[in-house]
Image: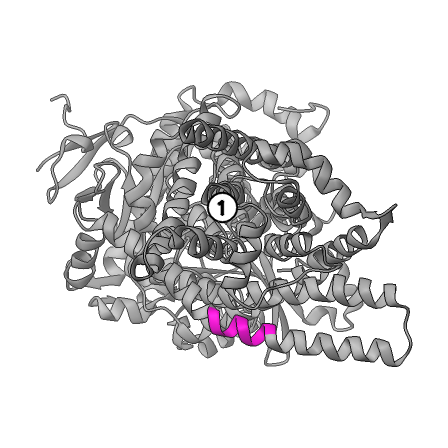
């Protein structure tokens, strides 16, 4: 109780001795008093024919939370959503890419026509615009599919059932059942996943959910994973089984991500974020028919705006920086190559190389541009590139000494490295703490370095 | 007669009346606000596939509580 | 969603018909379709996922009806106003201190009893309340009938039935809001009565507190809170007694919620 100089508060001194000692009892009596009257009003106003919770709803819940079907259904739905997103986004992504890169050609021609200096054309078009075009064509279609699907499930009322099923597991990891949902949201986009952590009331558990969200592989990282898995894991077996193996490899990485989430949550809740489990009360709302139209429009608009904003504000400058580094020379070598050289020893230890590392570094703002930067580095081109076919990519990588171990390390590092710029910014906004934001970047990075180190050294030992 | 049965002891499908709530503080308040009051009827609906939490029907709404917390709610079977 | 940061008392100064700008607070339990009502009335698109507690972003929207201009403030969904969480505090503080012209409480027709808990608590703070019994389509599906007229009589305040998803009842809702503001509907809200011993304590405390409280506040309600040893109301009053309780106060608290 604060300042007693206020007359209102000074009257408290007079009143306080009059207050009953047993406040808990008073509170109970007040609440029961209210409920008694609510009950009596309700009895006169409401006529209920059926029992409140039977029939279809109960049967549906019996299935969705059953011992045998509950978990498989969850896994199935998640896989389905991811599969629809990946397959469905393929064609639109290609279309967008074609369109945007056609536009790039027009812009280049335009710049040429007005005799703009080469460096300006390079910086603006090959650096900024290309990066922007990349992010939009890679990110927009998956986001436009994943989020409406996820929102559909949400509107149906299914998501609380997921929290209901998963609470025990997350509780054992010192986290909250709802973290499962924020984790799933992260599969779409980590920034959205971090924002969704608001559904967790307790600050401690919310922080754990925020810090581990990056272990959910977002749509931006999928293309890289799939490409590498197809090239390297698929190549290990005969043609017939290659795509299945590639899919399994991606699923395995996702599972690793989920396991990492639980492990790191467990670790955090025993060390930095120790504390009691918060009181858990979860309402399982009735299933409602989702409003399809509204969801689609709303989600589409939201996501499109978000991707565009991100492309312009974050990816374009990143592209500019990359171009500058690749086209500024100290002596004969570009700054890009120089940095890659410095990073090479560390890269080799981690089963990768300097160019891969600098690609990840420059890809901090947006994970989608990691692969293009990598290709640029290998070809020693002055600007980011995509290759026409997976085969061309495969040849390029093999030429630079890649083995399936390299691919594995890159895939794992993609899972276990700092969150992308947008996510970091979102984390900062949500936590209002530079300290936690820094930790959210360093923790996965450290984990990534250690894991790749172990895998690389381990594989070398085994090979001998 | 002392109440010895808690919500956590009741099997699925049974309907009971709340006798006493041992939870205290703001958690108690949250339970009361949801309608879990002494004298209120509560039905045990189902358990999570992992065994915890359990879903209850109270005043027309399904609320899930962890078994440890349900153990603090004493009930009467009538 | 952008939150309007201008205190409403100021923004209405910019608005030439300042008498014509009415503030409606939108309250209710989580998951009763409050956001649907909000969207339908204001045309704003705010996500309404079927996930209790989802509306974590508070929003304001506007609409016009019968020559009146309304600002609708979507309060966090809460089960009660006992201020044990920041959501409840924000809702309570807005209803009490920012004194909206009308508090519209959205209820779920399929579990009215629990929703009435909140309605009755709000009635202890203000009598300018309109009850909206939503999800009537869901209730019908489950064979639940709600006698809206009887509800209004029991509560002593107007009540409207809606199925906001399909827009049913919303026109009527707007009409009733208008009628209330025009003084065409008398509100004689039901007084909540507790057990005799409690009532005696309440009266005792109320007598002593009344001289120190502003005229517009419900002293009985404050007495109840003091009886529970919740002194935050008194602190709030003394901290802001020199202001006209501008809605700036709410914005700060809402900003804290967004964190």
Residue occupying image coordinates x 19% and y 33%: B7
Q: Nearer the viewer, residue A254 or C122?
A: A254
Secondary structure under tag 1 reads: helix
**Residue under mark 1: which chain is it in?**
A
The residue tagged 1 is A407
Residue beneath the point at 77% across and 59% down: C10
> Magenta segment, which residues?
A90-97
Residue C176, position as x, y percentages in the image: 49, 73
Tell me if residue A32 can be seen.
no
- Observer-nearest residue: A152 or A449? A449
Q: Which quarter of the figure is the C terminus of chain C placed in?
A: top right
Left or right: C15, with C166 as reference point: right
Q: Is residue A96 magenta?
A: yes
Q: Quadrant of the N terminus of chain C?
A: bottom right
Decide: is B51 above or below C71.
above
User: Would you say C259 lies left or right of A265 here?
Assistant: right
In the visual, does C178 lie left or right of B66?
A: right
Relative vertical location of residue A283 with respect to residue A4 in this rendering, above or below: below
Task: Assign the magenta stretch its main secondary structure.
Answer: helix
Asked if residue A301 is among those painted magenta in the image, a careful observer would answer no
Measuring from the top left, give residue A72's x and y in whole percent.
Answer: 24, 51
* Residue C16 on image: x %, y %: 78, 72
Q: Is residue A422 above or below residue C229?
A: below
Q: Residue at x 62, y 26 (%)?
A: A11
Camera-side residue of A417 and A189: A417
Position of A367 with respect to A28 (left or right) is right
Color style of the picture: one colour
Q: Relative to the observer, which residue lies in front, C153 or A215?
A: A215
Q: Quadrant of residue B9?
A: top left
Q: How many marks?
A: 1
């Amino acid at each position: 109780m604060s300042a007693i100089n206020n007359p209102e508060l000074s009257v408290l001194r007079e009143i306080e001795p009059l207050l009953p000692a047993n406040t808990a009892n008073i509170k109970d009596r007040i609440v029961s008093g209210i409920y008694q009257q609510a009950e009596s009003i309700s009895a006169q106003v409401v006529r209920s024919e059926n029992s409140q919770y039977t029939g279809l709803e109960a049967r549906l819940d019996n299935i969705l939370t059953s011992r045998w079907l509950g978990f498989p259904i969850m896994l199935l739905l998640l896989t389905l959503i991811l599969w629809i997103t990946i397959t469905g986004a393929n064609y639109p992504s290609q279309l967008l890419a074609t369109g945007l890169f056609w536009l790039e050609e027009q812009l280049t021609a335009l710049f040429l026509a007005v005799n703009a200096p080469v460096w300006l054309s390079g910086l603006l078009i090959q650096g900024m615009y290309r990066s922007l075009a990349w992010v939009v064509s890679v990110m927009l279609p998956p986001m436009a599919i994943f989020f409406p699907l996820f929102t559909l499930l949400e509107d149906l009322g299914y998501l609380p059932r997921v929290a209901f099923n998963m609470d025990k597991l997350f509780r054992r990891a010192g986290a909250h059942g709802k973290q499962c949902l924020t984790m799933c949201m992260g599969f779409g986009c980590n920034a959205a996943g971090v924002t969704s952590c608001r559904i967790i009331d307790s600050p401690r558990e919310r922080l754990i959910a925020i810090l581990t969200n990056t272990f959910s592989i977002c749509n931006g990282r999928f293309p890289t994973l799939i490409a590498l898995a197809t090239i390297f894991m698929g190549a290990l077996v005969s043609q017939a089984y290659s795509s299945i193996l590639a899919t399994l490899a991606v699923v395995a990485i996702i599972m690793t991500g989920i396991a990492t989430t639980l492990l790191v949550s467990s670790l955090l809740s025993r060390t930095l974020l120790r504390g009691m489990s918060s009181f858990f009360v979860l309402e399982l709302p009735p299933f409602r028919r989702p409003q399809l139209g509204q969801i689609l429009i709303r989600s589409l608009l939201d996501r499109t705006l978000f991707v565009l904003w991100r492309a312009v504000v974050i990816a374009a400058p990143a592209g500019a920086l990359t171009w500058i580094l690749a086209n500024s020379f100290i002596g004969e070598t570009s700054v890009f190559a120089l940095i890659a050289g410095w990073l090479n020893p560390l890269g080799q230890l981690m089963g990768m190389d300097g160019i891969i590392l600098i690609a990840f570094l420059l890809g901090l703002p947006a994970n989608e541009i990691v692969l293009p930067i990598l290709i640029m580095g290998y070809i020693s081109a002055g600007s980011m590139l995509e290759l026409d076919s997976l085969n061309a990519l495969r040849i390029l990588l093999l030429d630079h000494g890649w083995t399936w171990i390299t691919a594995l390390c890159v895939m794992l590092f993609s899972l276990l490295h700092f969150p992308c710029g947008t996510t970091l910014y979102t984390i900062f906004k949500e936590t209002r703490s530079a300290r936690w934001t820094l930790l959210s970047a360093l923790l996965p990075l450290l984990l990534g370095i250690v894991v790749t180190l172990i895998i690389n050294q381990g594989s070398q030992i085994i090979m001998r | 007669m002392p109440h010895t049965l808690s919500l956590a002891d009741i099997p699925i499908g049974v309907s009971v009346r709340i006798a006493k709530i041992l939870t205290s503080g703001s958690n108690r308040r949250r339970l009361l606000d949801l309608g879990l009051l002494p004298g209120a009827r509560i039905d045990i609906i189902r358990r999570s596939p992992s065994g915890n939490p359990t879903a209850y029907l109270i005043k027309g709404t399904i609320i899930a509580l962890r078994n440890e917390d349900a153990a603090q709610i004493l009930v009467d079977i009538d | 969603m952008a939150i309007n940061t201008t205190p409403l008392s100021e923004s209405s100064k910019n608005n030439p018909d300042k008498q014509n700008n009415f503030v409606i607070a939108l309250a209710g339990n989580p998951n009763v379709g409050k956001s649907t009502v909000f969207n339908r009335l204001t045309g704003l698109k705010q996500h309404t996922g079927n996930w209790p507690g989802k509306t974590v972003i508070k929003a304001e929207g506007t609409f016009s009806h019968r020559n009146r201009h309304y600002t609708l403030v979507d309060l966090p969904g809460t089960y009660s106003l006992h201020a044990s969480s920041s959501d409840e505090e924000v809702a309570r503080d807005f209803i009490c201190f920012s004194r909206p012209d009308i508090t519209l409480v959205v209820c779920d027709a399929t579990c009215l009893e629990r929703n009435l808990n909140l309605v009755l608590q709000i009635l202890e703070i203000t009598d300018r309340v309109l009850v909206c019994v939503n999800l009537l389509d869901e209730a019908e599906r489950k064979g639940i009938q709600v006698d809206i007229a009887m509800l209004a009589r029991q509560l002593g305040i107007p009540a409207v039935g809606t199925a906001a998803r399909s827009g049913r009842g919303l026109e009527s809702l707007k009409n009733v809001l208008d009628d209330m503001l025009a003084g065409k509907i008398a509100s004689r809200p039901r007084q909540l009565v507790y057990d005799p011993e409690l009532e005696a304590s309440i009266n005792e405390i109320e007598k002593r507190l009344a001289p120190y409280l502003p005229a517009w506040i419900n002293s009985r309600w404050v007495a109840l809170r003091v009886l529970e040893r919740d002194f935050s109301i008194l602190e709030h009053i003394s901290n802001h007694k020199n202001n006209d309780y501008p809605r700036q106060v709410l914005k700060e608290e809402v900003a804290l919620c967004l964190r």
